[in-house]
């Protein structure tokens, strides 16, 4: 679809939607605010329900600062795979609800630079179709909010052993309803700045969370309904 005024264009070809910068070799430059970019409002449209793949190879996110709600509710057939490993997230400060209730079996965030991110609230909340999740590259040294970050996932193992939580103030419901988890290493969790752990482990089987994890819980009860 030609555009004589230049700029980014998009067009539908069969079941595939294409986006182009119209300049060979030039990537599509994403906005600073990419919030709700692929948000699928189930009450208004089902047009994104059957999507199972998005090719991000030509998307330049180097200037993006906000990725909140970017893929919320996306997909519906549990065949969706999101390879976001090539995203340049060096300037992103908000990943709130980025993959919240996303119907994806695979979400690859292994290449994420999260050094500037301050909120990961509900980032993977209720994405129950995910089969595995690699968070080993996450730099959480500036994150202050992890409320509901990993709530209601059907994973047996969630590796957060490398998390720097020294600035996190809210961990409320962080692992809420993660019924399937059988391994969790909280050895390095620094909760000295945390003021809210309400329901952090609610509706979970946490007998394997050993007492050696000396979480600072002086002012509140966090092991609710465990």
Image (cartoon, rainbow, N blue to C red):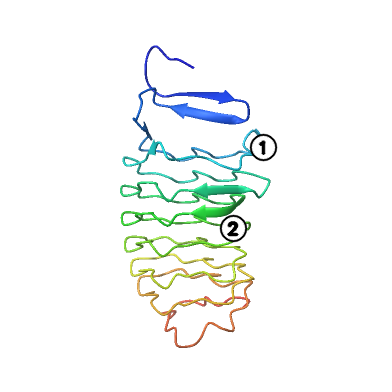
Secondary structure found at label 1: loop
Residue at the farthest bottom position: 211
* Image location (x, y in percent) of residue 62: 32, 42
How many numbered discs sit on the rendered protein?
Answer: 2
Up-down: is 85 above or below 214?
above
Identify the residue under disc 2.
130
Q: Which residue is mark 1?
A: 43
62 horizontally vs 226: left or right: left
Dot 2 crowding, Cα within 10 Å, few <14, some 14–19, many 20+: many
Q: Position of residue 126 (x, y in %)?
A: 60, 57
The image quadrant that residue 22 belongs to is: top left
Q: Residue furthest front?
A: 24
Viewport quadrant of the C terminus: bottom right
30 or 68: nearer the viewer: 30
> x, y (%) of residue 203?
64, 71
Q: Is residue 112 above or below residue 180?
A: above
Pointers 2 and 1 in contact (CB under 8 A)? no
Foreground pick, 9 / 223: 9
Q: Label 2, label 1: how many angstroms apart (C-alpha)? A: 23 Å
| Quadrant of res 67 | top left
From the viewer's perspective, is the residue at label 2 or at label 1 nearer?
2
Taking the spot 62% from the left edge, 37% from the top edge, the residue there is 48
Q: Earlier in the sequence, mark 2 or mark 1?
A: 1
What label sits on residue 59 in the rendered view?
A: none
Point 52% across, 50% down: residue: 99
Instruction: Please rate how many residues cluster around mark 1, counting C-alpha atoms within 10 Å: few if below 14, some from 14 to 19, many from 20.
Output: few
Question: Residue shown at 52%/61% (left/top)?
Answer: 148
- Image coordinates for residue 45, horizontal then vertical, percent: 65, 33
């Amino acid at each position: 679809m030609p555009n004589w005024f230049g700029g980014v264009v998009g067009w539908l070809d069969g079941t595939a939607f294409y986006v182009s910068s119209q300049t060979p070799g030039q990537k599509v430059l994403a906005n600073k605010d990419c919030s709700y970019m692929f948000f699928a409002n189930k009450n208004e449209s089902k047009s994104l329900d059957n999507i199972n793949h998005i090719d991000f190879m030509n998307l330049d996110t180097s200037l993006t600062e906000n990725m909140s709600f970017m893929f919320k509710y996306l997909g519906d057939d549990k065949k969706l795979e999101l390879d976001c490993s090539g995203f340049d997230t060096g300037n992103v400060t908000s990943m709130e609800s980025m993959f919240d209730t996303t119907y994806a079996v695979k979400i690859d965030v292994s290449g994420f630079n999260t050094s500037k991110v301050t909120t990961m609230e509900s980032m993977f909340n209720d994405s129950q179709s995910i089969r595995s999740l690699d968070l080993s590259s996450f730099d959480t040294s500036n994150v202050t909010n992890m409320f509901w970050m990993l709530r209601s996932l059907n994973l047996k193992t969630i590796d957060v052993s490398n998390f720097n939580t020294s600035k996190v103030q809210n961990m409320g419901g962080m692992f809420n309803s993660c019924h399937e988890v059988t391994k969790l290493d909280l050895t390095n969790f620094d909760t000295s700045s945390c003021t809210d752990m309400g329901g952090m482990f609610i509706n979970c089987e946490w007998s394997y969370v050993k007492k050696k994890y000396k979480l600072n819980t002086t002012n509140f009860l966090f092991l609710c309904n465990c």
